[in-house]
Amino acid sequence: MANSKSGVKNQTALLAAGHWLILSVAINVGLLLKLIHDGNLRIDWYGQQNVQDNGGRHSSYAAERKPDGQIQNEYINLDHGDPTMYQSYWKQMGDRTDVVISGWQSVSYFSDTKTVCWFLEPGFANAVTRLHKLVGNAETGNRHIVVGTGSTQLFQAVLYALCPYDAPEPMSIVSAAPFYSSYPLITDCLKSGLYKWRGEVDDFNKEAPYIELVTSPNNPDGSIRGAVFNGSGQILVHDVAYYWPQYTPISSRADHDIMLFTLSKSTGHAGMRLGWALVKDEAIAKKMVKFVEISSIGVSKDSQVRAAKILDVISDSYEDSKASNESKRFFDYAQEEMAKRWSQLREVVNKGQAFSLPVLPAGECNFSHHTFATQPAFAWLKCEQVDDCESFLKTHKILTRGGVHFGSTKKYVRASLIGREEDYNEFIRRLSLINSGESP
Ligand SMILES: Cc1ncc(COP(=O)(O)O)c(C=O)c1O
């Protein structure tokens, strides 16, 4: 009796589970069809789901591209500054950048360093110093290197280090527009009592301490910048992520008190998540280290070991005549690639009335000895005939980031020029069709 009762119970449970399964499959298929119908979900050729949320921001990325020709009907995503352009160069380098990391390595939190940054790998520090000396883009003497999980973490560390804990008001964080769109998001994300994003403003007390972010070459418009607010309370943070010879002529060694660099935009290894700060003042460097300690107890040693190898391979190719003959050297490749992309972009923009681009300064590069105009990682594109440039380009399946995110207007968008070649070529093809009045 007990057995037949439990048998009935089991049957009922099975039936209920079966109904629930059928119902949930139906609901999910329905949802899926609706998403596809609404254009919010693309199931890509490579089997990844790519959710077009908010203009494609924070959508997933494809590791590999589609076969030629298929791209013509796809959205092309130029919203992020994902430096995938560089991948083809590093593929050509074959095994020269390979690193073997054994299981016994990276066990300790601590690095074998004598610097204030207790999680800094000596090999990485040496490689950074060596490359800056070679390129001549930053002064490294009498400075502390602080490594971070991307320059994004170092930006937060700088804010923490510079803002007194007991100030009556949060410190103002200012930057001339157009400014890098992540600054306001990072600054205000935790509603800190230490600092507050103000952006480009005039109504703040310039006599009291404030932090001005100076990004040069600037993201998004590529301009070469100095401080603009010039109050007696000014503390400057220089974000020099793009001060490398593929983007702009190196005119002198940057010699600022606090400079932020990143692997993402120098070698293109955004996925290693490494940045470094060159900091003059020891107390500030120590507070930055404290922040990294509190927020992530250091920075991946594996990434630092890999990054050291990449940076050393670049330096070797310029310093060692045998290595220099083996293949094209990194900055030569990257400078030429950026020059090619900018010349194609300017040509297509100049052919019609729909768009315009900023005019950027030219000069001789102390590193390459070439004379060229700044050729930034992004195009700061102005739509001359429509008010909402981002939406307009989206109708042509080109995803960009609208000017409002950078403290500017909807007339502008930022489009990444450091993505994969096929996306870039398709972007040029579509701009050309728009400019000639045809529908892509
Ligand atoms: C000006 C600027 N600073 C910082 C970063 C962030 O770099 P990371 O990838 O090292 O966090 C970027 C990335 O786009 C940037 O453009």
Image (tube, grey):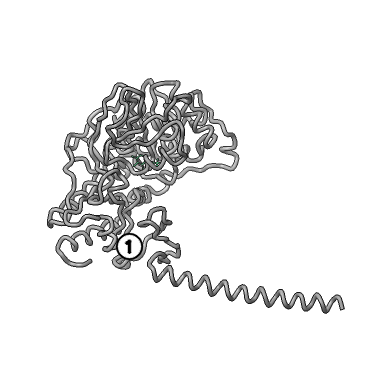
Estimate the x, y position of residue 98 in percent, counting from the top left.
45, 45
36 on left or right of 434: right
Q: Quadrant of residue 96?
A: top left
Estimate the x, y position of residue 333 in percent, counting from the top left.
28, 45
Above or below, 155 relative to 418: above
Question: Helix or strand or loop: what does disc 1 sit on?
Answer: loop
Q: Residue at x 19, y 62 (%)?
A: 434
Q: Quadrant of residue 323?
A: top left
Q: Residue at x 25, y 30 (%)?
A: 228
| Residue closer to the observer: 149 or 79 | 79
Quick one: which residue is furthest to the right in this view?
1
Q: Residue at x 29, y 42 (%)?
A: 219
**Quarter holding ligand 1:** top left
Question: Can residue 292 be seen at all in this image of the molecule?
Answer: yes
Above or below, 172 relative to 392: above
**Type of residue at label 1?**
Tyr
Question: Can residue 309 be seen at all in this image of the molecule?
Answer: no
192 on left or right of 228: right
| Residue closer to the observer: 324 or 414 | 414
Q: Quadrant of residue 315?
A: top left
Above or below, 226 relative to 330: above
Q: Where does the N terminus fall, quadrant-wise?
A: bottom right
Estimate the x, y position of residue 5 in percent, counting from the top left.
82, 77
10 on left or right of 273: right
Q: Where does the C terminus fall, quadrant-wise?
A: bottom left
Estimate the x, y position of residue 13 in percent, counting from the top left.
71, 74
Q: Residues within 10 Å of mark 1 (few under 14, many from 20)?
A: some
Residue tagged 1: 75
| Residue closer to the observer: 85 or 195 | 195
How many numbered marks have been drawn onto this rendered protein structure? Answer: 1
111 on left or right of 223: right
